[in-house]
Amino acid sequence: MKAKKIINILWLTILLGCKQEQVEINAPANDNPSITLTKLAFSSCGNQNLEQPILYTIANYQPDVFCYVGDNVYGDTRNMSVLRQQYAKLASKPEFAKLTAETPIIATWDDHDYGENDAGTFYPMKNFSKDIFLNFWGEPASSPRRSRDGIYTSYYYGDQEHRVQIILLDNRYNRSNLDGSLIGYTPSNDPTRTMLGENQWNWLKNELLQPAKIRIIASSTQFCVEHNGWEAWANFPLQQEKMFETIREAHAEGVFFLSGDVHYGELSKQTPEDLYPIYDLTSSGITNIEDNPAPNQYRIVTKDPIMIRHFGAIEINWDVNPVTITYKIIGGQGNTRLEHTIDLDELKF
Ligand SMILES: [Fe+2]
């Protein structure tokens, strides 16, 4: 009896040790027809060991939704208790508590919260880190996101005339190995290399066939930049072309990208053949700031990236004709450091 009691206590101790820090994440429903989206904020790369005052600025901006686009914590471990502890550090921050109390939150991951620097499909703990991620960000137990090969998902806002689709990609779970090394990746034209994996590509094709006026695709790594040796879609040019082709085939209008990862903010624009201009607003500025940015021939609006702590914002003006979209990078004092407005009509075939 005594031994059984000790075993029970041991089990209880283990279970409590594994229990994830509970935070009340205000996760929106996947479909929000009664909310007309006018302000979305997003950013990435927040070190949980540092103060994150930009989260106060984001809360004060009062976006309809805030999107974490990856490296939301720096886990970098194969020990899942350690990964949980890193999330717990984020959860304990008063600035995070304020943001999550006041703002609906959606999230995708990048390498460091997936679990390992620049990791792809071969990271062995991915199913465990996926559960930790989805539990932390408030994904319901019954969500189809839990049974997918990755954390990709989508959200919809607004009625038929104001329909905004937000697609969160998973650039980690199925991503093939990169050529080259940490000090410089080289582009691969191997047709078997994949960024998203077959299931996610098929899911994305179907998503792009759903009706929407504006389609925001969040990709943790940059979509529109030139190849520069760092992680980006440019390491798999055929996959980048597949994305263009997928948009063309679905005749999906109103598409643009959000991204993070690089420790600065910038706006990029590519004009592929037989397609409207594709924009990619990068915001990577919760805590980590790079002082040596990579070259990017597609960067527009500013000569250099924004290299202060910041967040990215999308503002949609539905009250004008044509509807406009404004891309912004906003600094810690609430000051706009980059601003570029386009007509939604520009994002048409
Ligand atoms: Fe990253």
Image (spheres, rainbow, N blue to C red):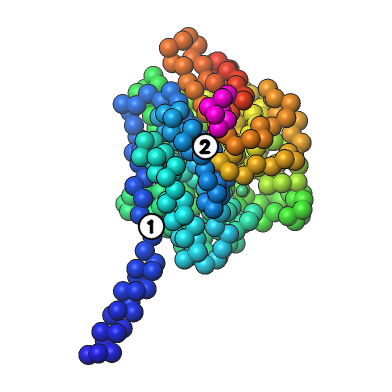
Residue named by callout 2: 54
The secondary structure type at the circle numbered 2 is helix
Over which residues does the magenta segment extend? 330-336
**Residue at figure coordinates x 69%, y 42% from the top left:** 290
Residue 185: x and y in percent read 75, 50
Figure quadrant of residue 224: top right
Q: Position of 98 compared to 202: left or right?
A: left
The quadrant the N terminus occupies is bottom left
Q: Is residue 333 magenta?
A: yes
The quadrant the C terminus occupies is top right
Q: Is residue 278 visible?
A: no
Q: What amino acid does circle 1 point to?
A: Glu
Above-or-below relation of 343 to 272: above
| Count of numbered circles in the view | 2
**Residue at figure coordinates x 75%, y 41% from the top left:** 292
Residue named by callout 1: 21
